[in-house]
Amino acid sequence: MPEILVGITLMLMITFPLLPALKASADKTVSYFDYMRAHVRTSRTKAILKSPVFYCGLGMPVSPSKYKRSFGSQKFDPFRWEGPIGVCKGPSGLDKSELRISYSRKGSTKAADAVESNLDEARFMLHKFPEPNELGESFSDNSPDIRNWVFFPSSVPPATPFCVTGLSGKEITVKNSMDASFSICRGDRVHHLRALRVYVLNDCLYTKDFRSPGDQPRVPGIMDIRFDVDVPKKTVAVYILARGDKLYDSPQEISGKEKWPEEYIGYWIERGSRYRLFASKTVWHLPNLKEYELLCE
């Protein structure tokens, strides 16, 4: 028994001085895991945005008036947006917290022959039948179905969206809303219109893909997202605020807050959060956001 008491006493004498170091080590481990969780969430958000940003505006006009006219002056999103990219107040109620972006995605088919049309409409052959769901089930002039709008990067005039008005086997009929004659190079690949709304609500990143029903939750743990778009400079700045997993007893510091403009980060500094928050900023170039004078009347 005395030996046991001596052992316990010695163990306590050795352990007590180490407790602060052990606690500091545990805190650093928790902080590291918080950082890694936030980093993963930020990376997933960037991955969702990367392709739409790169292909934003490919095959479509930039100016609001031409953009709307090129899609038939329809009264539905995304055809009535103020151009291929824009920001607005999202469901969170915060300024510039929603991105609206129209972009092209490469399809599975190509023009089998060169196309020359003196009218705004032409019928020609594709090299293969389109993949399922690439185009809509029914066709009409000025279709409200986003799947029935396509682009050809080589088309002249450039930045001319085409509405698919018919498909029979591999034979496709397309028409533009600019009342313009046009040409398409042989072998030019069909690109399909895609559009997204991107925003944060209730600590989760959402997207609204206009080819799918409803709004889709994508990345939990994203507290806020803001966008600054500069169309003349062809850039978009994306500010992402991601959290860790540990809920603390008191409000935590925001790492990287100096990367955000005061008018964005000030809301979170004042509000505070018991999660550790990590702020990031990414600036992307918009290489396909081009205005062409050839499209002017």
Image (tube, rainbow, N blue to C red):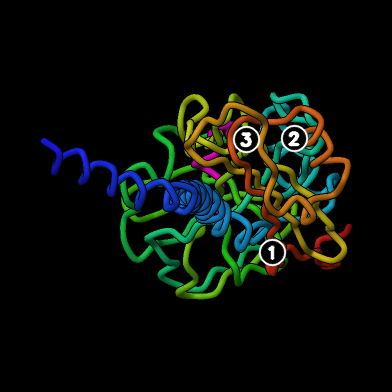
The residue that label 3 is drawn on is 223
Disc 1 vs disc 3: which is toward the camera?
A: 3
Locate residue 251, reporting x and y percent: 67, 31
Tell me: 246 left or right of 262. Answer: left
Q: Is residue 143 magenta?
A: yes
What element does badge 1 sit on? strand
Report which quarter residue 180 is drawn in: bottom right
Q: Amino acid at mark 3?
A: Met
Q: Amino acid at mark 1?
A: Trp
Which residue is most to the left?
A: 1
Residue at left offset 39%, top offset 62%? 109
Q: Amino acid at mark 2?
A: Arg
What element does badge 3 sit on? strand
Region in magenta: 142-150
The Cα–Cα distance between marks 1 and 2, rounded to whole angstroms, is 25 Å
The residue that label 1 is drawn on is 284
Res. 31 in view: yes
Q: Nearer the viewer, residue 272 or 66?
A: 272
Q: How many marks?
A: 3
Q: Is residue 57 above or below residue 137?
A: below
Q: Earlier in the sequence, mark 1 or mark 2?
A: 2
Residue at left offset 69%, top offset 42%? 253
Disc 3 vs disc 2: which is toward the camera?
A: 3
